Image (cartoon, helix red, strand yellow):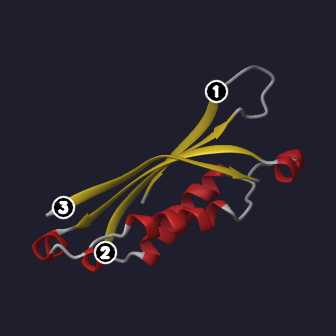
Amino acid sequence: MITTLFLTGMKFYAYHGCFEEEQVVGTHFMLDVALTYDAEAAVADDDVEKSVNYPLVYKTIQRVMNEPRHLIETVADRIIREIKHDFPQVTHVTVKLCKLNPPLEGKTEYVAVQMEG
């Protein structure tokens, strides 16, 4: 039973960016993650230990968000790699990472990258 788990609208304050002030002052980020896995055994036994425990997935994401990087692409890639490492039953991860109020000359709600792996 192929299942997709969504964690959406996660908000973090972090220090990712190429500009020195982004790494010192930080900014707000919003994150959506979808991960795919086979939930058949978990459903059959109604057992969270056989499922993907989403509070633990959140902690994995939080850990990566707390590691400053220059590129949001690098952050998204690390999230995918860490989720797949921490939860080997996950076969596919999609991450959409939005940097809110990016340092542009005009007003933009956010810039975002979406990566899959």
The residue located at (61%, 68%) in the rendering is: 63
Q: Which callout, 1 or 2, points at the residue further toward the start of the chain?
A: 2
The image quadrant that residue 103 belongs to is: top right
**Residue occupied by mark 3:** 2
Name the residue located 74 percent from the left edge and 60 percent from the top edge: 68
In primary-sequence order, the first of circles 1 and 3 is 3
Mark 2 lies on a secondary structure that is loop
Q: Picture coordinates of residue 35 (x, y %)?
A: 35, 59
Q: Nearer the viewer, residue 33 or 55?
A: 55
Mark 3 Cα-neighbour bin, 10 Å: few <14, some 14–19, many ≥20? few
Residue 81 vs 86, above or below: the answer is: above
The residue wearing badge 1 is 109
Are the residues flagged by discs 1 and 3 in contact, CB closer than 8 Å? no
Please, what is the three-letter code of the amino acid marked with disc 2?
A: Gln
Cα distance in 3D space between marks 2 and 3 = 11 Å
Mark 1: secondary structure:
loop
Question: In what element is the residue under mark 3?
Answer: strand
Image quarter in which the C terminus is found? bottom left
Q: Position of residue 24 (x, y in %)?
A: 87, 52
